[in-house]
Amino acid sequence: MTSKRCEKGTGSVCMESKKLEMGSRDLISCLPREVLVEILSLLPTKLAASTSLLSKKWRYLFALVHSLDFDDTVLLQPPPEEGREELKESFRNFVDRRLALQCGCGSRIKKFSLTYLVTNNSDVVDERRWISSVVERGVLEVDVTLRPRWLGPVHTDEVHGNCFLPYHLFRSKTLVKLRLGTDTNVGKLPPDVFLPALKSLFLDTIMFDDQDLSDVLLPGCPMLEELTVVHKTDFYPNYRISSQTIKKLTVFYCYDFGIDDGSRISFDAPSVVSLNYTDYALYEYPLVNLGSLVKAKLDISYSKTNIKRPDLSGLLVGISNVETLHLSPDSTDLISRCVKHGLVLPVFNNLVTLSFGSKNKRGWKLLPYLLKHSPKLETLIIQGLDSYTGDVTIGLFQVKELHVVGYKGTAKELQHLKSLLAGTECIPKMQVEFPEDVVVDDAKMIQTRRDLFILVGVVSTDVAYFE
């Protein structure tokens, strides 16, 4: 009896499982069309295109996809010894067909991404055509990564001139976000650049003729709010970044090979609120107009082989109105070198939060000087406590909150912290943060709590711990 009930029960379960399985196969197809289009738009274009083989419905849905991502590295990496041209031709045909399909349906493309190896003029013509096609259809976001392996003259015509990129890209009325790369000299920009809707611009190792960045491109972006300039070659362009609308500015240079006594950079951006600047110290900073600056992060290194006596006075005066300042260990070492050679620090009248990293005695010598020039400082974040030397006297009298980043709880660090706090009457709040490579178990927490209580229990009312 029991056996029969089990068989019947098993059969029922099997039938229900089949119904569930059959139903789940069609669950995605039953979703609203708008949802399916959003899902396809999140997939790589090659994968999304493969769904068009399922049925006419899916073929129609793919035509409505609003995000296209074409990447020839899928075919050409690692570079094949033979058949490269055949693969490139296959890629060209694939892009042409996809764009024609979207164009035939009249659907709007929101985002267009292209990664493309440029080896000849024909490739330049192709990328110009593809980008122009999506721009003419009101694209909102363009991300183009060109990988040029060809140094010949760019094909010149009446529309594009000798610019690597299409003329239409610089006259888009709808483009909101533009990202260009990599290691490309775009040539001479058209003089009538006008991107009235562009808010975000990212340039990754892009070279311009003369001062086209400051004189042509940026003036043609009246709504630009965010600019990122990354440079990863040994050629150092003397950029002048000038814009009345940019609010967030990031500049990242990672090589010092091309730096000499003529290397300069200027910032004329009075609306910038946030600055993130990574570079090697330059000979001078002739213009730094950052009147609205609230937060600045500096990671500037000393170049041992090029500029022996960099002049940071223009840069530091230009950012002296910040409320939050982050100085990397390389920056503090550099500024301390400059102070030794006569640099006078400006007064940071608005500075409330200072993040200070140091890797040697020279860097730590800068901290008391900075504290004296920061009358409103309340929060001090320090990193590199293990390199602190006790013969550097630091008065933390005005500090209300102390953060120690990268604290490992060693006896050496504890002694350094004791020296750092010597003579300090009261710090209302103290926080320590352990690095990721330190295992923090209950025993570690208890020991750290005990050590810090003995050290600062009298002068601190709130000690917090972060893992």
Image (cartoon, rainbow, N blue to C red):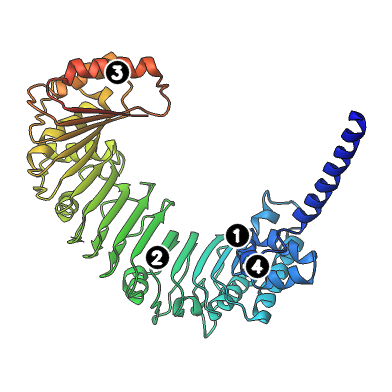
Can you give x and y, in whole percent of width and height, for residue 169 in the image?
A: 49, 76
- The numbered dot on residue 42 is 1
- In the image, taking residue 117 as reference, residue 176 lies left or right, namely left
The residue located at (24%, 51%) in the rendering is 295
Name the amino acid, label 4: Pro
> Are the residues flagged by discs 4 and 3 in contact, CB closer than 8 Å?
no
Cα separation, mark 2 vs mark 4, equals 32 Å
Cα separation, mark 1 vs mark 3, equals 46 Å
* Screen quadrant of the C terminus: top left
In the rendered picture of this protein, how many numbered marks are placed on residues?
Answer: 4
Frontmost residue, 62 versus 92: 62
Q: Which residue is mark 4?
A: 32
Q: Which residue is mark 2?
A: 200
Name the secondary structure under disc 2: strand
Which is nearer the N-term, disc 4 or disc 3?
A: 4
Frontmost residue, 428 versus 25: 25
- The numbered dot on residue 448 is 3
The residue located at (34%, 55%) in the rendering is 250
Which is nearer the N-term, disc 1 or disc 4?
A: 4
Residue 4 found in image quarter? top right
Name the secondary structure under disc 1: helix
Name the amino acid, label 3: Thr
The answer, for residue 463, to whether it is visible in the render is yes
Name the secondary structure under disc 4: loop
Name the secondary structure under disc 3: helix
The answer, for residue 118, to whether it is visible in the render is no
Which residue of the protein is positioned furthest toward the front in this rendering?
A: 1
- The numbered dot on residue 463 is none
Which callout, 1 or 4, points to the residue nearer the camera? Answer: 4
Cα separation, mark 4 vs mark 3, equals 56 Å
